[in-house]
Amino acid sequence: MVTEINYTQHWFPGTRDELLAQISQQLKPKRFAHVQRVEHTAMALARANDVDVEQASVAGLVHDYAKQRPAEDFEAAIRAYDMDPGLLNYGNAIWHGVVGAEFVKRELKITDEDILNAVRHHTTGAVYMTKLEQIVYMADYIEPARDFPGVEQARKLTEQELGLGVAFQAKHTLQYLVAKDKPVYPKSIMTYNAWIQRYPTV
């Protein structure tokens, strides 16, 4: 997969190759390949939804920047940055987005709140999400290597209308967590409640 884009708008203070180099130091090859597929998918969704493609590239690449950090890093960050102590009751599935955005901001010097919120919300969703946040939320869910029951429907709905995809993912993620007897992060329930009201037919 070849991505040709020159960074000119300073969402990240450097080139795409420099960003890739920094991310590659944090992720194992399989995860590094995933973030590049998410970038590619996010850029396509950005073009289809009138969102800045460079911004989508950066957000797609950094969404899993903290995915493979040890738990101790997240726990220390939650305390150091005075984040909600309730986060300590969860694990990497929540931390790498909600807390990971703090690492993206401080280590990669990315300060755009839309990109940071896209990182924060890419697993939990949110009641209100900008188009960029919706794009990263869906790109992570439907990138080409994803293979799970319903993924083709998710891709079709997202192509039809971005919000339909968001509602579909919020609903099916909640169903999955409940079926697996896993705790549900409160924001994920709020996301479901908000988006299923907007798109009740998914």
Image (cartoon, helix red, strand yellow):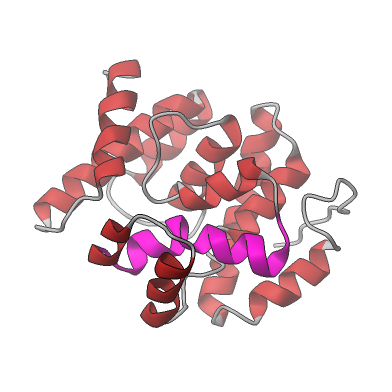
Quadrant containing the C terminus is: top left
Between 67 and 36, the one nearer to me in the picture: 67
Between 130 and 160, the one nearer to me in the picture: 130
Residue interval drawn in magenta:
90-110
Q: Is residue 25 on the magenta stretch?
A: no
Between 96 and 84, the one nearer to me in the picture: 84
Between 138 and 83, the one nearer to me in the picture: 83
Q: Position of residue 184 (x, y in %)?
A: 20, 50
Q: Position of residue 49 (x, y in %)?
A: 64, 27
Quarter location, residue 103:
bottom right
Q: Is residue 29 left or right of residue 155?
A: right
Asked whether residue 36 is in view, the answer is no
Q: Residue at x 69, y 62 (%)?
A: 1
Asked whether residue 79 is in view, the answer is yes
Q: Position of residue 192 (x, y in %)?
A: 28, 33
Q: Residue at x 47, y 78 (%)?
A: 69
Q: Is residue 148 left or right of residue 142?
A: left
Q: Position of residue 66 (x, y in %)?
A: 51, 70
Q: Residue at x 80, y 62 (%)?
A: 16
